[in-house]
Amino acid sequence: MGLFRLLVILGIAYLAYRLFVSWQRLTQQPKPEPRKQVKNVVPCHFCRLHIPEAEAIQKNGRYYCSVKHLQQDQDS
C-alpha cells in the first residue's frame, strides 16, 4: 500500500509540475507587434488596387502598383 501512495503522490506532483511549466510558457510568450498605420493610400491608375503611397510608383501625377502597370498604361 505504501508503494501505491508514493506513485499517486509522484503522479500528482508530475501533473502539477507540467501545469506550472505550461502556464509559464503562456505568460512568457512575446506579445505581437502592433500593426503599422498606413497614412496615405492611393489607387493604381491601371487596376484600381489601393496601395500605400510610399510603395506606389508615381509618374505624371498618377500612381501605379507596379512597373508592369505603368508600362501597360503608357502603351495604351
Image (cartoon, grey):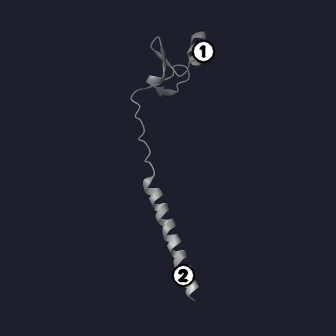
Q: Quadrant of residue 61?
A: top left
- The amino acid pointed to by label 1 is Gln
In primary-sequence order, the first of circles 2 and 1 is 2
Determine whether, in the image, residue 65 is placed left or right of residue 38.
Answer: right
Q: Quadrant of residue 72?
A: top right
- Vertical placement of 44 versus 26: above or below? above
Badge 1 marks a residue whose secondary structure is: helix
Residue at mark 2 to residue at mark 1: CA–CA distance? 79 Å
Q: Quadrant of the C terminus?
A: top right
Residue at image coords 55%, 75%: 11
Picture coordinates of residue 26, whole percent (x, y): 46, 57
Q: Nearer the viewer, residue 74 or 22?
A: 22
Q: Which residue is mark 2?
A: 6
Badge 2 marks a residue whose secondary structure is: helix
Picture coordinates of residue 14, whole percent (x, y): 53, 71
Q: Which residue is mark 1?
A: 72
